[in-house]
Structure formats: structure tokens, C-alpha cells
Image (spheres, rainbow, N blue to C red):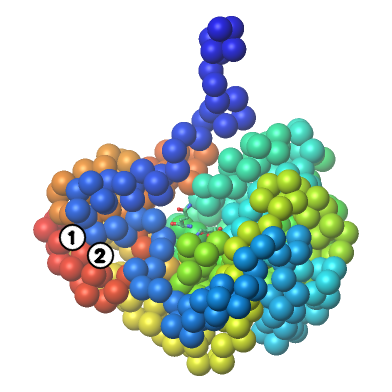
Amino acid sequence: MAAMTRPLLNRRLAEFGTTIFAEMSALALSTGSINLGQGFPDTDGPEEIREAAVRALRDGRGNQYPPGPGVPELRTAIAAHQQSRYALAFDPDTEVLVTAGATEAIAASLLALVEPGDEVIALEPYYDSYAACIAMAGGTRVPVTLRPREGAYHLDLDELRDAITDRTRLILLNTPHNPTGTVLTREELGAIAALAVERDLLVITDEVYEHLTFDGAEHLPLASFPGMRERTVTISSAGKTFSFTGWKVGWATASPALITAVRSAKQFLTYVSAGPFQYAVAEALRLPGTYFENLRADLSSKRDLLSDGLTAAGFEVYKPAGTYFVTTDIRPLGESDGFAFCRALPERCGVVAIPNAVFYDHRDQGAPFVRFAFCKRTEVLQDAVDRLKGLS
Ligand code: PMP
Ligand code: GLN
């Protein structure tokens, strides 16, 4: 039984445990609370896109293994989307890879590009799968902390520059940024691009919230900056843009050499996934501009509803410029421990949220911050706001 005497979970993963999203969604279910924790919409995406998936299933498209890189219809639609939206030209045959959600694209990119011992810079607070995937790749994560100032979170470019060493392999970027709602500006992205070129770094950029920006904030893909087209893996997915998080259709766009590398890892993770849904997402990417405008307008008003409600309930609110999350500071409520606060919140007022500390290496820096999701029906958000009023 010697095999059983040492810990079963290997040391690369030992620190990670169960994701906070699973823990908090289970808590929402067991307490009957409103779940503003895990980020998923409580209404499905466009009916015609669901019908497209049904049609694909019925017509026998994608019911068997699709091609490894993704079905040509979807790869073409992804390339057309990058072209029409950002004037970025990608060859659908050599520069586009369909993945099992953005999650697999992130994992495959890190597994493909990181050697054990390489350093990977990630903006802290970072989405939880980044840390786990860097660890699985044998890399060392180097957090660069976004800091709250004047109602928003900011990147300190000097800190980023100082974090780069001879061992740095790549920067793992996320804009619009989960959980802070920050959208990196043209100046910030330009400076990151210049650093990447100067220090000869690769960049993986997670842009799953590319369509969810508010108040005129503009999402700019890093790949469009000088020198970045050849050194950037751009990742997105259908989950947020089309409100089908369960379909797990994601993608990466990059140079042929980078896509080949990422595909080398991806082929041994899932090989392929989501056959019929790939056809449906190809149609979704071709929805008219009004679809994307309406999505933004709807989420923008929900952001205001929840932000105002949280402010009224006594939280300090960092109003997001993008994503569907709002980060709050709980200290004005006399609280300082986001974990304890989130674990008690269902009991206190029937709402579930996420403690931002889980997204930090420097846990103390994240301790008083709590994230709420606003991708829910208006009446659900109103109910949550009414419940939260009881806190102060
Ligand atoms: N990146 C970020 C920043 C996310 O918030 C999420 C989850 N919503 C993902 C990646 C994963 O996306 P997917 O569901 O497409 O795997
Ligand atoms: N990305 C979603 C969030 O940040 C959750 C995804 C997940 O459950 N892993 O809430």
C-alpha cells in the first residue's frame, strides 16, 4: 500500500482544492440563495442559435469527431469576426484553433509554451484556472497586482517592467479583466506590447469578455499592436458573448507556429469537443451588430442596478468598465475578511458572492474585496439588492 501513504494529489495541484465557483454555487443551492457568485447568465442566448444547434444535431453535423482544429465553418467565422471587428487577418486553416471553451485554450497554450522553471507573469487578481494551469505546466507564476485607486483598478507599468526577468517566458493577460472589470487602455496595451517586444516575450491574452464593455470603453486586442501579431495567442469563447457557457466552445487565434504548438497540447487534452455546437457558434458570430449592441446595453443597465444597490447597501463599489462582475470593498460595512463574509452572506441575507482573495497570491491584498455577478434577470438583481439592504 506504499502508493497510498503519500498524498494522492500531486504537489503541483495540492494548493488548489475545489474551485471557489463550485463551492459557492453549491452553497447557493443548499441555502436557496440568489447566486451572484459563479459568472453564468440565468437566461440562455438567442433562440435562433439554439435552433441552429438543434438543426446541426438533427442533420448529423458534428455528432462524430469534428476535425482537430475545429469545423471549417466555425474557423472561417472566427477569422471573419477578427477581421470585421478588429481588422486582424487570420487564416482559418492555419491560424485558428477551436477549443473546449477558453479554459482549454488557456491550458493548452500554457502546457505547450511553458518549460518547467519558466516564469509566467499574470495580472493579479487572476482568474483561478491561470494559477492551476501554470502549475500543471511546471511554470512559476509571477503576479503583478492591479491596485484600486479612485474607483477603479489600475496596472502599474513599472511593476510589470520590474517583474520581467531572464526566466520570464510569457505574460498572461486578461482584458476586460475578471474580477475587477478593468479594461486595459490603448496606452497600457501599447506599453505592454513594447515591453513584450523589447524583452522578447510571448503573450497569451484572454479576451473572453471582449464584447462586454460599457460607457464607451473600447476593447482592443493586444495582437493589433506593433510587433504583437507574431508573439500573441488571443483567446476567446462563445460562453460570455452568446450566453451559452455550457456549450464550452472557445478558440485561439495566433501565428501558424504558435497555433501548431498550442494544438500539440490540445490534441491530447480533449482532442475535439462540442461538434454540433461549433456549427451553431459559427452562426452566432455572424449575428448582426444590433445583437452585440443590445447585449452591451442590457448588461450596462444591470451593472448600474447592481452597483447602485451595492452602494446603497454600504459597499464601496468599483464600477466595472467591462465583464459582468462588480468588485466591492466590504470595509465600509465594518468587515475585512471576504472569505468569512461570503461564507456568512447566504445565512445573513440569502445572496452568494465570491471572495476576491482566491484570485491573489498576496491574499492579504485581496482580503476585503468581494465580487458580485450581474449577468442575471433584472428581477433577480432587484431581489438581491433588496436583500443586501439589510446588511448595513
Ligand atoms: N477566462 C476568464 C477570464 C473567465 O472569466 C472565464 C470563465 N468565465 C474563462 C476564461 C473560461 O471560459 P470558458 O467557459 O469559455 O472556458
Ligand atoms: N468564469 C466564471 C467566473 O469567473 C466561472 C467559470 C467556472 O465556474 N469555472 O465566475
Q: Is 371 above or below relative to 83?
A: above
Residue 57 location in percent, x, y?
A: 56, 72
Residue 5 in the image, given as x and y percentages of width and height: 53, 9
Categorize mark 1 by other alpha carbons within 10 Å: few (<14), some (14-19), many (20+).
many
Question: Disc 2 marks which residue?
Answer: 310
Q: Nearer the viewer, residue 187 or 226?
A: 226
Q: Considering the image in quadrants, where does the C terminus appear?
A: bottom left
Whether residue 316 sits left or right of residue 259 in the image: it is left
Q: Name the residue under label 1.
A: 388
The first of marks 2 and 1 along the sequence is 2
Along the line of sight, the residue nearer the viewer: 146 or 68: 68
Quarter of the view holding residue 259? bottom right
Q: Which amino acid lies under the numbered mark 2 shown in the image of this protein? A: Leu
Q: Position of residue 376 (x, y in %)?
A: 32, 70
Whether pointer 2 and pointer 1 mark residues with C-beta atoms closer than 8 Å, the reply is yes
Which labelled disc corresponds to residue 366?
none
Where's the N terminus, which quadrant?
top right
Helix, strand or loop at disc 2? helix
Decide if residue 257 is on the left or right side of residue 39: right
Q: Which of 360 and 277 is in front in this view?
A: 277
Q: What residue type is labelled 1?
A: Leu
Q: Answer above or below: position of 67 versus 56.
A: above
Q: Does dot 1 land on a helix, a strand or a loop?
A: helix
